[in-house]
Image (cartoon, coloured by chain):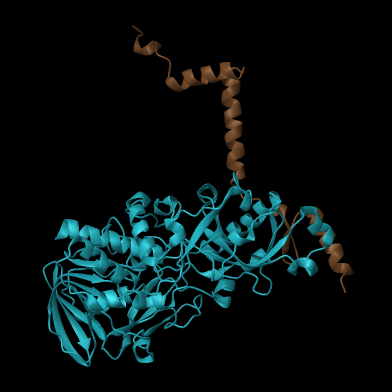
Chain colours: A brown, B cyan
Amino acid sequence: MTSPSRRINPTRRLIIKLAFLVKLSPLALVQACNRSSEVNSEKNQHTQNDLIDVNGWWLKPDEASIYTKYLQTKP
Amino acid sequence: MIVFPSSALKNTDYDIVVVGSGPAGLSFSESILKVKPDLRICILESGGIEINENTQKLHLGSFLNPLVKEDFQNNRARVFGGTSSMWGGESATLEEDDFEEKPYFDVSGWPIKLNELKRYYTDAAGYLRLTSYLENNQPKDEFLLQLTGSSIKQKLWHYSQPVARLGKDRREAISNSTQIDLLLGSTAVGIKSSGKKINSINIQRSSETTTINARFLVLAAGGIENPRCLLNWKSSNPDLPYNNDNIGRFFSVHPYFSLNPAQKILLFSKNHDSDWYHWGDEKKRKIHFVLSEEVRSANKWENLALMLWNPSSTELQNELPKSILDTYGKATHYEFNVMCDMRLTSESHMSLTQSRDSTGLRGINVQMQLHPKTPSSWAEGLYHMATVLADMNMGRVKLGAKERFTADYLYEHGTWGAHHHMCATRMSSTDLNGVVDKDCLVFGTDNLYVLGASTFSTASVANPTFTVVALAIRAAEHIAKHRM
């Protein structure tokens, strides 16, 4: 019978199994998961600064410059 | 039967008196009879069969805040069938997330969960003829914008077809009912109690006051009239067993705004079926864009619904250069507006006026206050939607300067739609921030219930009628099974 102190935490056991499956060390797997979580968190942060307001239209920077020129040539 | 103001009352003792014959009062009355067919119910309606100017004037009061610029008497109807007589017919269910407590708001969450309301939505859809809900009419993926994985969700709205006009739809059934007496031209002007129990209701009818006795009183007079009645009754009878500190507080609407009133245009650049994205007379359903729970929670935002109409593939020709439009193939131009949820604040409140209407009830002034964080939350959420659509090459949005979205700008320009009056007799788990409990029973009383959008714990972005009727049917079942 395994004594309580020798029991492996179920989460840790899962990480070891998954690490084996994806051919990473358990530490590398945990770090990769953390990075993924950060990416997901960033996805939920708004990034409206990426768009540029030209005449009310919210455009990507390259479009904004095309549209600005277009407005200048418009009669 | 329908009792006109000129007819004498034959009965003054009922099991239940319902104040108001709108969607909440009618659906409640007809639903409870399905469980307890022997009940005697009296419905009080201060209006008549048709809307008339004199009874509309009973809506005495005003919006004190410039955010709401509409007439106080508009968008409400004192008539048999209530506001269903002017209903647009569109509605949507609340989402699971609407019921959750949000730690980043001062006051939020419902004392019930969506799954406690779900089965009543089915009955409510039948009552309101929201057939697309009953048919589970879902769009196929290929007809929709591909936004999976983004922080924008596409939410389905349903349409009543043809629009339920309950005064007309239910007239024959109520006329022929042996259990329901609908008293037209009758206004509840006061109530009397003994301990926690309401015993009787004073009604004003053809310039005479009559007393009706009831085992239960159900107040279903509308989002503003419900708090107005409670405050008036308490004002004339301070011994009534309920407290009035929270009555009228947390009043909320989900205003429609145009940030850029001159040019509200939305462009989609991918193939999609515009039939799902705009409404028209023949439509039975429509998609609106809302913010995902995750992005709102991460940024502490209120929700928004972006609603499109009037699609056109030619309108854009002079708006953007061809070189941009050609990048994305088919482009469809829409007009749009935004319906915004608003976080609750106890600063929003109501107070009785000194002036009285022709029945003797005092009018009510509504002071709707935005939470200081609300304008920037709306602005950030809206611009986030624009960003996601651009990032995913699904569309471009013309909004104008973000700086316009300030409280000052909003107060100056006002809303062009704030006619869903909610939360002023809020449902809550305690009387600290609410007026009714999870079963719509007024705190402190034994037999006084309130129905309608005034009991909503939060406003959300869904048009309220569907949930109003679902809650009324739920309350009917509760009273029939647990209180009789």
Q: Residue at x 65, y 51 (%)?
A: B388
Visible in this render: residue B450?
A: no
Taking the image as shown, residue B346 lies to the left or right of residue A12, namely left
The picture places residue B457, in percent across and down from the top left corner, at: 36, 60
Taking the image as shown, residue B402 lies to the left or right of residue B202, namely right
The picture places residue B194, in percent across and down from the top left corner, at: 10, 71
Image-quadrant location for residue B437: bottom left
Image-quadrant location for residue B81: bottom left
Total marks shown come to 0
Q: Residue at x 52, y 17 (%)?
A: A17
Image-quadrant location for residue B44: bottom left
Q: Is residue B95 above or below residue B280?
A: above
Q: Residue at x 69, y 71 (%)?
A: B263
Q: Nearer the viewer, residue B399 or B374?
A: B399
The picture places residue B112, in percent across and down from the top left corner, at: 32, 53
Q: Nearer the viewer, residue B115 or B291?
A: B115
Q: Is residue B16 above or below residue B482?
A: below
Q: Residue at x 49, y 55 (%)?
A: B137
Visible in this render: residue A35?
A: yes
Q: Is residue A55 above or below residue A9?
A: below
Which quarter of the rendered picture does the N terminus of chain A lie within?
top left
Which quarter of the rendered picture does the C terminus of chain A lie within?
bottom right
The picture places residue A18, in percent across and down from the top left corner, at: 54, 20
Taking the image as shown, residue A56 lies to the left or right of residue B231, namely right
Q: Nearer the viewer, residue B237 or B162?
A: B162
